[in-house]
Amino acid sequence: MDERDNIPKLWQMQREQFLSALAKRIKDLRKKRGFSQEAFADHAGLHRVGFGSIEQCRRAPSILTVLKIAQGFGISLSELLKGVDRPIKRR
Protein backbone atom coordinates (compact mmCIF):
# COMPACT_ATOMS: atom_id res chain seq x y z
CA MET A 1 0.00 0.00 0.00
CA ASP A 2 1.34 3.39 -1.01
CA GLU A 3 1.47 6.11 1.68
CA ARG A 4 -0.47 8.40 -0.66
CA ASP A 5 -3.52 6.13 -0.27
CA ASN A 6 -3.90 7.51 3.27
CA ILE A 7 -3.86 11.19 2.27
CA PRO A 8 -7.66 11.62 1.84
CA LYS A 9 -8.31 9.93 5.19
CA LEU A 10 -5.63 12.01 6.92
CA TRP A 11 -6.96 15.20 5.34
CA GLN A 12 -10.49 14.36 6.50
CA MET A 13 -9.27 13.72 10.05
CA GLN A 14 -7.36 17.01 10.09
CA ARG A 15 -10.36 18.86 8.66
CA GLU A 16 -12.64 17.46 11.36
CA GLN A 17 -10.15 18.30 14.10
CA PHE A 18 -9.72 21.82 12.75
CA LEU A 19 -13.48 22.40 12.57
CA SER A 20 -13.92 21.01 16.07
CA ALA A 21 -11.20 23.33 17.41
CA LEU A 22 -12.75 26.30 15.59
CA ALA A 23 -16.20 25.50 16.97
CA LYS A 24 -14.79 25.28 20.50
CA ARG A 25 -12.97 28.60 20.08
CA ILE A 26 -16.14 30.30 18.83
CA LYS A 27 -18.24 28.84 21.65
CA ASP A 28 -15.68 29.86 24.28
CA LEU A 29 -15.50 33.44 22.96
CA ARG A 30 -19.29 33.68 22.71
CA LYS A 31 -19.81 32.51 26.27
CA LYS A 32 -17.00 34.72 27.59
CA ARG A 33 -18.80 37.71 26.08
CA GLY A 34 -22.17 36.65 27.52
CA PHE A 35 -24.00 35.92 24.27
CA SER A 36 -26.48 33.13 23.66
CA GLN A 37 -26.10 31.41 20.28
CA GLU A 38 -29.19 33.18 19.02
CA ALA A 39 -28.13 36.62 20.30
CA PHE A 40 -24.65 36.32 18.83
CA ALA A 41 -25.96 35.14 15.46
CA ASP A 42 -28.25 38.19 15.33
CA HIS A 43 -25.40 40.48 16.45
CA ALA A 44 -23.03 39.13 13.77
CA GLY A 45 -25.66 39.14 11.01
CA LEU A 46 -25.77 35.36 10.68
CA HIS A 47 -28.66 32.94 10.43
CA ARG A 48 -29.38 31.53 13.89
CA VAL A 49 -29.67 27.91 12.79
CA GLY A 50 -26.61 28.16 10.57
CA PHE A 51 -24.52 29.61 13.38
CA GLY A 52 -25.67 26.89 15.75
CA SER A 53 -24.70 24.26 13.19
CA ILE A 54 -21.21 25.72 12.91
CA GLU A 55 -20.75 25.82 16.66
CA GLN A 56 -21.97 22.23 16.94
CA CYS A 57 -19.65 21.02 14.15
CA ARG A 58 -22.50 20.02 11.87
CA ARG A 59 -21.53 22.55 9.20
CA ALA A 60 -18.25 23.98 7.93
CA PRO A 61 -18.35 27.77 7.68
CA SER A 62 -17.26 29.65 4.58
CA ILE A 63 -14.37 32.08 4.94
CA LEU A 64 -16.87 34.96 4.73
CA THR A 65 -18.87 33.51 7.59
CA VAL A 66 -15.70 33.11 9.67
CA LEU A 67 -14.91 36.75 8.93
CA LYS A 68 -18.41 37.81 10.06
CA ILE A 69 -17.92 35.83 13.27
CA ALA A 70 -14.58 37.55 13.92
CA GLN A 71 -16.15 40.95 13.24
CA GLY A 72 -19.02 40.08 15.56
CA PHE A 73 -16.50 39.51 18.34
CA GLY A 74 -14.65 42.69 17.38
CA ILE A 75 -11.43 40.80 16.72
CA SER A 76 -9.27 40.06 13.70
CA LEU A 77 -9.55 36.86 11.74
CA SER A 78 -6.09 35.86 12.94
CA GLU A 79 -7.15 36.40 16.56
CA LEU A 80 -10.22 34.21 16.04
CA LEU A 81 -8.04 31.45 14.58
CA LYS A 82 -5.41 31.76 17.31
CA GLY A 83 -4.58 28.26 18.51
CA VAL A 84 -7.09 26.64 16.18
CA ASP A 85 -4.55 25.94 13.48
CA ARG A 86 -1.92 24.28 15.66
CA PRO A 87 -0.43 21.16 14.13
CA ILE A 88 -2.54 18.07 14.67
CA LYS A 89 -0.98 15.75 17.24
CA ARG A 90 -0.56 12.19 16.02
CA ARG A 91 -1.58 9.47 18.41
Image (cartoon, rainbow, N blue to C red):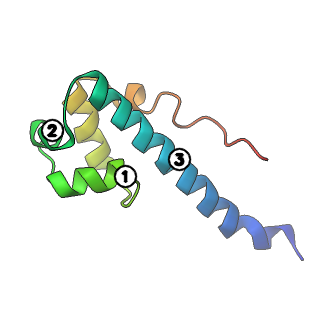
Q: Which residue is mark 1?
A: 56
Residue 82 placed where, x, y %?
A: 48, 27
Q: Which residue is mark 2?
A: 44
Residue lying at 29% horizontally and 28% vertically, measured from the top left: 31
Q: Quadrant of the N terminus?
A: bottom right
Q: Residues within 10 Å of mark 2 (few under 14, many from 20)?
A: some
Q: Residues within 10 Å of mark 1 (few under 14, many from 20)?
A: some
Q: Which residue is mark 3?
A: 18
Q: Nearer the N terminus, badge 1 or badge 2?
A: 2
Q: In the rendered image, which quarter is residue 29 located in?
A: top left
Instruction: Give the residue type at disc 1.
Output: Gln
Q: In the rendered image, which quarter is residue 77 located in?
A: top left
Instruction: Give the residue type at disc 3.
Output: Phe
Instruction: Give the residue type at disc 2.
Output: Ala
Q: Nearer the viewer, mark 1 or mark 3?
A: 1
Residue lying at 22% horizontally and 40% vertically, measured from the top left: 68
- Is 73 placed left or right of 46 in the picture? right
